[in-house]
Each structure stands twice: as C-alpha cells, then as structure tokens.
Image (tube, rainbow, N blue to C red):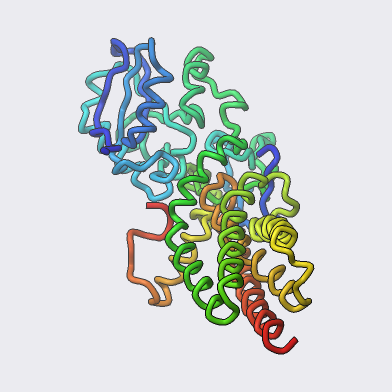
Amino acid sequence: MKNFRYLEHVVTLKLDDFICIGCGRCLEVCPHQVFAANGEKVRLADRDACMECGACALNCPVRAITVDAGVGCASGLINEWLQVHNLRKVSSGGCCA
Amino acid sequence: MDYIVPPGLYAVGHPASSDPVVVTANYKMSYDAVRQSLCGRNVWLLVLETYGINVWCAAGKGTFGTGELVRRVKATRLADIVSHRRLLLPILGAPGVAAHEVARRCGFSVSYATIRAADLPEYLDNGMVTSPEMRQLTFTLYERLILIPVELVLAVKMIAMVGAVILLVMTLLGGMTAGILGFCAFVGASFSGIVLGPLLLPWLPGRSFAVKGAIAGILWSVLFYLLAGGSSWNGAVSAALFLTLPAVSSFYTLNFTGCSPYTSRSGVKRELHFGLPAMAAAVVVGIILLLVGRYLL
C-alpha cells in the first residue's frame, strides 16, 4: 500500500510451498499484494504488508495458507481482553458494531 | 433513519438473463454506491443480509459470507433467472467468502472484481478483468478526514468525564487557573490523538500508531507550553506536561488502527502489549511530578 507500512516481522501469515497448486486465488483476494506468481507456485512477495484479514487462507482451495486472522483494531482487542478476564459483560463482539 | 436495504435480487436498468450479477451488502451506503456506479447499465444486483453492516466489516464477522451467499442465491432462484454461472464480488468481501465452497454448494463461480464500487464500470468494460489499480487500497487525506467525526463522537463521553475529573481535582489542589489549564491540556491532547495523529499519519515518523500519536501529543505539548506560559513553571511541572499529554494522544491514535485498512491483528497486539504499560507509566509518573512540582519545589 502506497505511503503506509505497518510493523515488521509480526504477521502470522504462512504459505506451504509444497501444498500450493499455484491457482492464484490469493493474488486475486489480497488487497495488499502480499503474494506474487512464482512459476507453477505462488510466493510471499511482501509478507510484512499483510493485515491478516484471512481472505487468502479462506479462499485457498488446498489450505496451503494459514494466518491468525482477525481485525487489527485496538479497541476491539482491548474489549476482547476485558471479556476474557471477565471485566466486561459479553457484548456483540469487540470491534465496531 | 434506516440504513438497511431488504436483501434479495434487484435489477439495475433492464437486465437480461445473460447480464452480470454483482453482489453487495445490505448497508444502504454500500448498496447506493454500487447502484450509482452502475447507473445506465443493465446489471443484476444480489444484496446479502449483513444487517446493515458494510462489506468489509461484515466479511470480517462472517455475515457477508459463504453461507449467506449460497442461501441468497438459492432463495432468489438466481440459477433460473440468469443463464450464466458467475458472481461478481467486492474484493473486500473475500475475508468472509470461500469461492471454491460457493462453487461447490451452488454451482456459481466467484470473481473478485474490484475494491471500490466506483471501479465497477471500468471492470465491466475491461472484459471483467481486474487491473492492478482496482486491487490497490488507498487511505488518502480525505478518506482519513471523513472518519474523524465518528471517532470524535465515540470518544466525547470519555473525554468529558476524564476532563471533568481533572478540572475538579486540579481546581481543588491548585485553584481555578490550574483546573482550567489542566482541562484544556487534556482535551487538546485527546484531540491531537484523534484528529492530528490520523491526519498526519503518513508524515509522522515511525510505523507504530502509538509512536505516531505520542509525537502528535508532543507537538501539542510544545504548543500548550508556549500558549499557557510554561516558561514560568518549574521543571517538574513541565516534565509532567511532556509525559502525560503524549500518553493521552498516543492512546487515541492507537485507537485509529480500527479505522485503518492496513494494520494487522498481530501488530496491534504488539502495540498494545508495549504501548499500554508505557502510557500508564507516563501518566502515573507525570501525576507524581505534578504533585512534587506543586508541593515540594
């Protein structure tokens, strides 16, 4: 994404080269151009640009991609933490609405 | 006001059985954006039940998802209405939809078309091929600006409550002037974090939102120091100002991660892990310094 980079070396995205069939679905769904074609397979071209939305993993027909998907939202994570520690009643679920 | 459009199949223009099917959420603004961009064309519009939530947030929650898409295709008997078997989905809907599952369960193939509804006409004219620009997220000054009013409204209650406590306590301990100064300093720091941090986002140094917010807070601290006649304060009070105000701004700019389209869950977790204790420490040390400066120096 132009002009914006988030923290390095934190994302949980993993691609299993062995399982990948190179269908290219992940290239289609990723809004941050994390993947690139690599012959018959796909490679992680820009792993740190990943925002862990989980679109690639969900759309991978052979489950070659794993990622701890979720929303990168501070108040959502704080609410989640408060709920886990029973400091707040369970609401509709963290972030936004 | 009602922001929900009933889910189902809609016609834009006079679509025939061979015309494309565009899928969207039943948030009125999403629906209107798609409809307006397709104005003058003949297209089917399949609206999913996302309970009035936009595509991106609904996909994250799974309501804009495989199950609802398959259910809606069947409920509208889409297979009897159109002659092709292709659905055009917004790219930001992909976190909720497994394309291969949709194909398996209802026979329709999924094409992730564009990020923005405004690019749909070009996509359709382009032989339904997504260009790199249609896949490119942006976060322009204007896109950030329009998010800020909502952030302000969400924060105003908390700011008013904490501000009132500061006003009361500082007035009791140091007189009316101190109370008003403390109140203004805090409110300004909150605004710096909510308005200045997000607006200056790409230009503030560092990658961490907490750091960017702290820097916005330092800018405010300098301005406040100059405006409020900080040169007459003792060192402890000045140090307290430069510790507490950036901490407040930092917290609010860190909150803006929820509005940004590029922060990861793991990254925000890390920021919270290091940021929240640092902010709390800065506030506690700042308060101690303020008391020291008031009573011991």
Q: At x 56% / y 66%, what residue is drawn? A: B183
Q: Is residue A62 visible?
A: no
Q: Is residue B121 above or below residue B290?
A: above
Q: Which residue is more in the foreground, B222 or A72?
A: B222
Q: Is residue B35 left or right of residue B208?
A: left
Q: Is residue B181 left or right of residue B202?
A: left
**Residue at the bottom extreme, as displayed:** B296
Give residue A66's position: percent from left, percent from top.
Answer: 54, 54
Q: Is residue B72 above or below residue B235?
A: above
Q: Which residue is more in the foreground, A52 or B200?
A: B200
Q: At x 38% / y 10%, what residue is drawn? A: B40
Q: At x 42% / y 45%, what residue is drawn? A: B57
Give residue B273's position: percent from left, percent from top.
Answer: 60, 70
Q: Is residue B113 left or right of residue B104?
A: right
Instruction: State the quadrant of the C terminus of chain B.
Output: bottom right
Give residue B275's position: percent from left, percent from top.
Answer: 63, 68
